[in-house]
Image: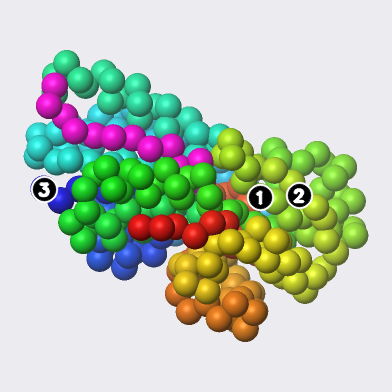
Amino acid sequence: MAIKILTDSGCDLPKDILEEYNIDLLPIIVIDDEKEYLDGKTIDPKEIYDNMRDGKSYKTAQISPKMFQEKFEELAKKGESVIYVAFSSGLSGTYQTSLLVLDSLKDEYPNMDIHIVDSRSASLGFGLLVYKAGKMAKEGRSKEEILRMLDFYVNNIEHIFTVDDIEYLFRGGRVSRTKAFVGGLLNIKPILDVPDDGTLRPLEKTRGRGKVLKRMLEIMDERGGTGDLKNQTIGISHGDDIETAMKLKAMIEEKYGCTDFIINTIGAAIGAHSGPGTLALFFLNEKYED
């Protein structure tokens, strides 16, 4: 039996990949004042970014227990063997909620075959896990093989990202008003990563966009030395800034000879916190031996 891959919209994968590998997606909730939207279904990232540039702020909420229950019951009734890859537990309560819902359904569906994985990742760092899982599932690989791969990726995926305007980190509660004000005056571009616990961590500060790209490439070199970068799938996601994303891609192609990229807009759920102009880079720090 083929394995069914289920995930949520924080993975930021392009729709064509989701469709090609028959990956089901649960939407994170985006809140505009009192109105709720479903990420990627009833609100578009472009709308989010345009409105944020005009000063609007958004909030997000995790996938509801009801949504999990309905989806898990649907899959259980079909007798599907499922792996649900969840948004990082360090950034959202979605993973924990999915575990609680799954546990509540065990008596009613004793034969339910759903395995939940904490990606400890975000955006296309998370998306690369899901992409690889979907690809292996389509190839007919076993559940054990897919879970082994996911464990490797969870522990070896690198996230390097920057925001174009530190003001958006203030709105999202990530920095103080003073830091946002001073950072804006000095054109400071923070570089952050996602450590092993799946949270956000500031690494350093750089002045100016051009220096940020150069430094991101240097960090990639420092961390990806044993990861066979040339033969990896490299992820690049952006907050409505495809031009800069393609510039970073060209720099990586020139330095490492990489040919396999997934490039996509950061979805509404993550973009609501990181803002327009965000740029993120994802790769493995060790070579995966299939």
Tell me the magenta residue range: 110-123
Dot 3 crowding, Cα within 10 Å, few <14, some 14–19, many 20+: few
**SS at mark 1 in the image:** strand
Please state the horizontal and vertical placement of residue 123, each as a whole percent of the image: 50, 53
Mark 1 to mark 3 CA distance (whole Å): 37 Å
Please state the horizontal and vertical placement of residue 201, each as a whole percent of the image: 70, 43
Is residue 113 shown in magenta?
A: yes
Q: Is residue 161 above or below residue 200?
A: below
Who's the residue at 46% across and 50% down the image? 153
Q: Report the residue marked by disc 3.
A: 1
Who's the residue at 70% across and 38% down the image? 173
Q: Report the residue marked by disc 1.
A: 193
Q: Is residue 89 above or below residue 183?
A: above
Horizontal side, residue 23 vs residue 12: left or right: left
Residue 59 found in image quarter: top right
Is residue 25 shown in magenta?
A: no
Who's the residue at 48% across and 79% down the image? 259
Which kind of residue does numbered mark 3 sit on?
A: Met
**SS at mark 2 in the image:** strand
